[in-house]
Image (cartoon, coloured by chain):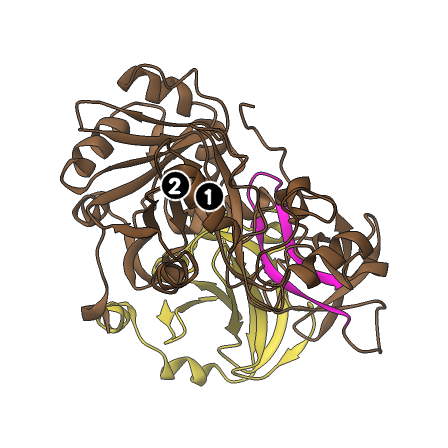
Chain colours: A yellow, B brown
Amino acid sequence: MKFTEEHEWLRVEDDVVVVGITEHASEQLGDVVFVELPEVGGEVAKDDEVVVIESVKAASDILAPLDGEITEVNEALVDEPGKVNEDPMGDAWFFKIKASDLSQMDDYMDEAAYKDFIG
Amino acid sequence: MSDDLRQTPLYGLHVELGAKMVPFAGYDMPVQYKLGVMKEHLHCRAAAGLFDVSHMGQVIVRAPGGYDEVARAMEGLVPVSVLGLAEGRQRYAMFTNDQGGILDDLMLANRGDHLFVVVNAACKATDIAHMRDGMPGCEVEEVTDRALLALQGPKAEAVLARLLAGVAEMRFMDVAVKASDFGELWISRSGYTGEDGYEISVASDQAEGFARAVLAEEEVEPIGLGARDSLRLEGGLCLYGHDIDEGTTPVEAALSWAIQKVRRRGGERAGGFPGADVILNQLENGAPRKRVGLLPEGRAPMREGTEIYTGPEGGAPIGKVTSGAFGPTIGGPMSMGYVPRDHAAEGTQLFGEVRGKRQPVTVAPLPFTPANFKR
């Protein structure tokens, strides 16, 4: 699993990368009340804003960590955004992306480095 | 920056309880505890929540002529009947400016020989100066050695009655002074959540003991400023500096109910407060715009600053959201804001622009959750 400085986690699953937010991010956000997901089939570029999350405190975005095509989104989060707080590292993944260049993953932190990063 | 923040007498308890502390109105305050905003909010609606509101200003105003003299002087600053307030009763008021705008909103209590005033934290220094300037002959004393706690929720009465005799009998907006194991308590049956409950002023050095005793009751959880904000918004209550300010009049803000007949045109003590011409005229003829409830479609909150339009595209904004959040009790987003009066009727369909997209929003009655006061 890899981690971005934007507090996303990336897990390679067959030929796609599953993206979610970290436990640390979900704690910082507070209770999530709204999630807007990208279109399946859409082409995205790294750093595009692809997901909107609204918590009880504020709105924030998830950026696409890689160039590629969105192959699946977690529709369950639309009806139950609270899952993001309950299981951010598991059930509450946001989208799957078919990366055009998997070597972009190399830029991201491993778990130890991420732990150092959040202190 | 945090070096300059003030602490309330309950600071140590907040930290011990695992609160996340944030700067608010110059104080280091708990925004949430371990439950988090959503669960704290729901807990307060279902049982009881304890809030530290010690940052708010507590002020005693006296005059040689007693309450009547103070009340007459205060009526020169607020559009409210202070003289008509019975002993042991409290009412909501606002300081107005010459344009009819609101300098602050506050609570006034007739405590027999003096007037007890509770004002917002961010405004307290200017409010006190304003009273000293505007109430000649009166002695304005800021109470700096007492904490202020709010116990709110349907179980508040049962909880407080276990600790203190005579509180169950109090009605909404009654005030009383009671001796207790924690020294003299100044109690009002009021709050700012839309729930029944009490606000309790306690000596600073007794505040933590009192708070611990209340928190030891199983119905009670500590509640932070985050849930305080969503509770008051569901309750349709204004937050100063957001929903009301120097540029909004009480009539625009839908606070006309706070202006008793005796202060209106034809009343025995009509006018005589700053901005009376503007406010009394608006009371008779209506204000050009009005604060309304707004219920967005879908789940996305329409937050403060969201511009309101009449149609799904084009046109200029007609109004703005002044408070917006997710309402845990109503299970959806809720906002308040100002719209022109010809768009203020309940059920009017409008649009708010969120992240560049116009989303439907309907003018809705306030409060969003029914008030649960013990009248």
Q: Is residue B337 left or right of residue B219?
A: right
Badge 2: residue crowd in 10 Å (few <14, some 14–19, many ≥20): many
**The disc label shown at residue B71, or none:** 1
Residue nearest the viewer, comparing B226 with A87: B226
Q: Amino acid at mark 1?
A: Ala
From the top left corner, tell me how far across and down residue B142 is, in percent: 28, 52
Residue pictured at 40% horizontal, 38% vertical:
B67
Q: Residue A91: in sight, yes or no?
A: no
Q: Let me know if marks 2 and 1 both belong to one chain.
A: yes
Residue B330 counted in the magenta span: yes
Q: Which residue is mark 2?
A: B115
Residue nearest the viewer, comparing B292 with B33: B292
- Is residue B209 positioned above or below A43 on the image? above
From the top left corner, tell me how far across and down residue B211 is, in percent: 24, 34
Q: Residue B29: in sight, yes or no?
A: yes
From the top left corner, tell me how far across and down residue B241 is, in percent: 51, 63
State the predominant SS element of the stretch in magenta.
strand
Give the chain letter at badge 1: B
Quarter of the image containing the C terminus of chain B? top right
Give the chain letter at badge 2: B
What is the magenta range?
B318-339
- Is residue A8 positioned above or below B88 on the image? below
Asked which secondary structure carries label 1, the reply is: helix
CB under 8 Å between discs 2 and 1: yes
